Every structure is written in C-alpha cells, then in structure tokens.
Image: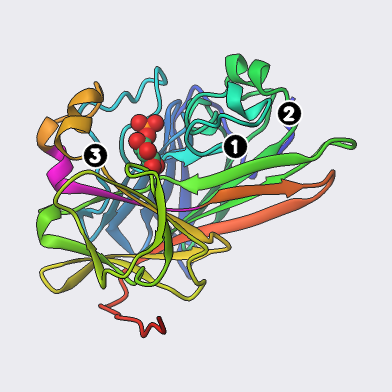
C-alpha cells in the first residue's frame, strides 16, 4: 500500500499527460509526461526548458535550459535499473561513501540505497513552474538493501523546473514510534562543462576541507579550485550564504545554492579513476564534467521518532559573484 497519496491518478502502463490551461481555459502545451520509467517536465512558457527524471533513483538525468543540456551524463550510464546512474543528479541516502563504523550503515554499499531504488511517482503538485514529487520508503526500496539496513524512513523529493532554475528539495521523515533515524544526504550533481581545465569552482576559499585522496583536513586558501588532476574534496560547514559557482571563460556556467545543506563535495575522477569505472564513458568524459555536490555528509543528521528534516539544492543562472571572505 502506498503511504503517500498520489496527486493525480496515474496508470503506470500508460504515458500520461498533464495539460496546462491558459486564462481562456484552452488547453495548452503539456508540462508533465510520465511513462513507466521516467517523468519529463517541459516548461509551459518555454518548451526549450525541460528536465527528465528517471524513476530509478529519482535521478534527474537531463536538464535543458534554452535547449542547452546543463548536466553531464555518461554515455555508458545504465538507465535500466541495473546500477546507479553515472551522471545527472543521483541521490545519496542514508550514507555518503562507504561507512566503516556504524553497525547498520556500514552494511550498505557506497552512497546508500536511494540511488538503487525505484521511487514512486506521486504526481504533479504545481503547474507553473511545473513541479512533481516522488517518494521512497522501505516497502518499495531496494529489498536487498533494506534487508541490510532494516530502518523505517520516508523520503519525498520535489523537482521544480523554472525558466532559469532547477530546484530539487528533499524531505526526510522518521515514521518510527521507537527508533531514531541517522543519515547523510547529498545531491550528487554532475555538471557539464566544455573544458574542465579551463574552468574553476569559486567561493569556497577559507573553508575547512577534507581531502579524500590525501586523507587530510585543512583550510583551503586557494582563491578558486582548478582541476588538473583527480580531486575528491569534502568542504565542511560552508557558510549558508556562500554561492558556489562553476566559472568558465569568465562566465558563471552553473550556480549552486544550498538550503540547509552545509557541505559541498567537489569531485573529478580524472584519467585513471575514469578508466576504473566501467560505466564512465567516453573515457575522456572527465574533461567535460565536474561534480559539485551539496549535502550533509561531514556528520550524520539524527531524527527522533516523528521528526522530519528538509533541504534543497537550487541550480540557477546567477551572474558571476565573488564573495568577500574574512580569513
Ligand atoms: O562511483 P560512485 O559510487 O558513484 O562514487 C563516485 C564519487 O562520488 C563522490 O561523491 C565521492 O566523493 C567519491 O569518493 C566517489 O568516487
């Protein structure tokens, strides 16, 4: 039995169209299409703005603004539910990376179970900007993994497509009457860029960072982060008002805003790591992508029975912004 009320009746064997009406009541362009495996949102005021969400992992696999793809998706990504998607915006829950210390979380694979589970499509909640919701809870999550982590939880993901933004919001609820819920959350966003070596990530200067490759924590004093080798950096407790940007040739290509997400991972696998990932294609793809991943990963969030937690990632087109820093 679904725990979440669907906002529209939805027959999973049919493609269903949700139509917009203009002021005269005439039916106009459809903004949400759903089929068995994916949901596609198209902006009613500009059909060149769209996003596609795979029900497997509730993974955003495409986001187009004025027809330009914003996200990087491996050409070798599996979209058939056989493994998490390499690219787009996979969702990381309840654990970031591979946990070694927690009795239950350590049994889960790297990055948890949300990206390995097929989510329930709840329907459309707003017509403009088109907004949809997905849910995940133990009864429908990947059963091999819930057997390893027998914990009650309920997740609602909201995806909103603006004319100039994509907002992904998460609500985590602890429905248990007796047990607490301990978790990490992360939006593992893969951004598309023309040439990673010509780009930089801004506005993280002065932040404490854990370098996963060096296994060291330090304060990053670099004014910007450039990528000329493998990088795997976890910035911790980044000030709420820091707007992280991916800048290329003097233009802010991507702006990443975090709501209740204190951490940000910056990752590029570079040459050798890309070769070791079977689903990372083409192998030269590391030159055209960078992951900037807002999350809560440097420690765990704990929800007591009945409590909930909300956070969001907002991707938009803010012009270049260098923020003043007191070091
Ligand atoms: O190969 P996965 O499980 O999708 O992980 C990709 C990368 O995800 C990043 O978030 C981690 O910081 C990296 O350490 C990891 O390699």
| Frontmost residue, 248 versus 213 | 213
Q: Which mark is residue 151?
A: 2
How many residues crowd around disc 1 within 10 Å: few (fewer than 14), some, or many (20 or more)?
A: many
| Frontmost residue, 244 versus 44 | 244
Name the quadrant of the C terminus.
Answer: bottom left
Whether pointer 2 and pointer 1 mark residues with C-beta atoms closer than 8 Å, the reply is yes
Q: Is mark 3 within 8 Å of ligand 1?
A: yes
How many residues crowd around disc 2 within 10 Å: few (fewer than 14), some, or many (20 or more)?
A: some
How many residues crowd around disc 3 within 10 Å: few (fewer than 14), some, or many (20 or more)?
A: many
229 vs 160, left or right, is left
Q: Is mark 1 within 8 Å of ligand 1?
A: no
Task: State which region is magenta.
Answer: 285-295
Q: Magenta stretch: residue 62 in it?
A: no
**Of discs 3 and 1, which sits in the foreground?**
3
Q: Magenta stretch: residue 290 in it?
A: yes
Task: Residue under label 1, please give it.
Answer: 94
Relative height, residue 166 to residue 90 (above, below)? below
| Frontmost residue, 211 versus 55 | 211
Q: Position of residue 256 (x, y in %)?
A: 38, 63
Q: Where in the image, quadrant-wise, is ligand 1 located? A: top left
Of marks 3 and 2, which one's residue comes earlier in the chain? Answer: 2
Q: State the residue at coordinates (31%, 33%).
A: 86
Image-quadrant location for residue 180: top right
Q: Mark 3 to mark 1: distance in Å?
A: 23 Å
Q: Position of residue 19 (x, y in %)?
A: 46, 50
Q: How is the image coloured?
A: rainbow
Secondary element at image label 2: loop
280 vs 110, left or right, is left
Task: Residue under label 3, please give it.
Answer: 269
Of marks 2 and 1, which one's residue comes earlier in the chain? Answer: 1
State whether residue 194 appears in this view.
no
């Amino acid at each position: 039995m679904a725990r979440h009320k669907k906002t529209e009746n939805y027959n999973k064997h049919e493609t269903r169209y949700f139509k917009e009406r203009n002021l005269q009541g005439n039916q106009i362009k459809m903004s949400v299409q759903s089929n068995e495996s994916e949901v596609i949102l198209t902006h009613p005021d500009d059909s060149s703005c769209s996003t596609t969400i795979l029900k497997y992992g509730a993974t955003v696999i495409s986001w187009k603004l004025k027809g330009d793809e914003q996200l990087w998706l491996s050409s070798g990504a599996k979209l058939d539910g056989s493994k998490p998607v390499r690219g787009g915006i996979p969702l990381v829950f309840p654990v970031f990376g591979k946990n070694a210390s927690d009795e239950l979380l350590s049994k889960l694979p790297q990055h948890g179970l949300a990206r390995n589970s097929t989510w329930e499509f709840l329907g459309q909640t707003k017509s403009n900007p088109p907004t949809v919701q997905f849910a995940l809870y133990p009864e429908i999550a990947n059963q091999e993994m819930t057997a390893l982590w027998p914990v009650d939880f309920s997740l609602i993901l909201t995806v909103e497509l603006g004319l100039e933004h994509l907002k992904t919001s998460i609500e985590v609820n602890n429905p248990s009457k007796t047990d607490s819920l301990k978790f990490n959350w992360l939006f593992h966003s893969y951004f598309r860029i023309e040439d990673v070596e010509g780009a930089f990530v801004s506005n993280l200067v002065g932040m404490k960072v854990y370098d996963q490759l060096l296994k060291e924590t330090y304060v990053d004093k670099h004014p910007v982060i450039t990528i000329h080798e493998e990088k795997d950096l976890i910035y911790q407790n980044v000030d709420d008002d820091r707007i992280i940007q991916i800048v290329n040739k003097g233009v802010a290509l991507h702006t990443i805003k975090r709501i209740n997400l204190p951490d940000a991972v910056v990752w590029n696998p570079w040459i050798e790591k890309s070769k070791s990932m079977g689903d990372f294609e083409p192998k030269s793809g590391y030159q055209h992508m960078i992951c900037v991943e807002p999350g809560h990963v440097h420690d765990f969030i704990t929800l007591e029975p009945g409590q909930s937690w909300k956070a969001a990632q907002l991707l938009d087109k803010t012009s270049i912004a260098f923020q003043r820093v007191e070091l």
